[in-house]
Amino acid sequence: MHTPADTTSRVWFITGASRGLGHAFAEAALRSGDRVAGAARTTAPLEELAAAYPGQVLPLGVDVTDRDAVFAAVTEAVGHFGRLDIVVNNAGMLSMGMVEEFTEAEARAQLDLNFFGALWVAQAVMPVLRKQGSGHLVQVSSIAALGGFPSTGLYSASKFALEGLSEALAAEAAGFGVKVSILQPGGYWTDLYTAMRSTSPLEPYAPLREELARQFAEGSVDSDPQLAAAALLKLVDSYDPPLRLLLGSMVYDLAFDIAHTRMDTWAAWEHVSRAAEHAIPAPAVADGETGSQRETR
């Protein structure tokens, strides 16, 4: 049993807080004396935290793919604690399979949770944070957002989309005193892999699957989630937090390798890139009207 937190302590809203990194984040926040509104489909682990940290935890049963439920949960959290200081968009799942193998339902399920769920949370909390003139929204991305890898195409797509959204949101929110950061973790010993969903395999990809399994068996080393939680606390304690924070040596080195490879490719094709642009006067539009037409992709 722990002493209840001071009511002036920070308030966290964490999705996917019943397991994995989300649960580690919640525990770290509680140990530091803060209060946590924990959102999850299954709240039993959060009820246990509430018993261990009386007055500090509000368990919220919510499916983040349900937009109305997300808004209701945020309203309940603010009504209970009076404010929100740190929001951690952590809920997500991993679907593995070659791009060709995904059914429409499987593809939509991956994007619904990892991208749209995070979007609904961001939309629900921004009015609260704007009104306060403060707050920190942390988007939990992945090593899979550094690049697309065989068998992680849809998972990578969901995290790429989340990062593009988060960059735009960071620029939009800055004028209101609201900070946005993107966490890019490597591997941690959570149930992400045990809860992983897989597509029905197509036979032509069997050799590639065997090679991926061999690489995973030889090179996969995961870490204690508490290390990620410690890094998150340093991030939210920072006066000037970064837009992105890599978590882990492997993901750090990979990020630089990918960036250097991309820069080398861009440089090699610079002459083609620059030749594809040459300003001309705005063309006339239909019916003799004048105006500008511009296409960007």
Image: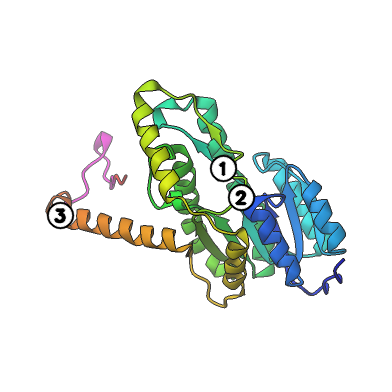
Q: SS class of the residue under badge 3?
A: helix
Tag 2 and tag 3, C-beta contact below 8 Å: no
Q: Which residue is mark 2?
A: 190
Asked whether the beta carbons under mark 1 and mark 2 sit within 8 Å of each other, the answer is yes
Q: Toward which corner of the image does residue 125 lie, by quadrant?
A: bottom right
Distance between mark 3 and mark 1 Cα atoms = 38 Å
**Kind of residue at disc 3:** Ala
- Between disc 3 and disc 1, the foreground one is 1
Alpha-carbon span between mark 1 and mark 2: 7 Å
First reached walking from the N terminus: tag 3 or tag 1: 1
Q: Residue furthest bottom?
A: 239
Q: Which residue is mark 3?
A: 268
Name the residue that disc number 1 marks. Answer: 193
Task: Specify the segment rendered in magenta.
Answer: 278-294
- Label 2 vs 3, first from the N-terminus: 2
Residue 181 in percent (x, y) is at 53, 63
Q: Residue at x 41, y 31 (%)?
A: 98
Q: Position of residue 214 (x, y in %)?
A: 39, 40
Looking at the image, which is closer to me, 278 or 181?
181
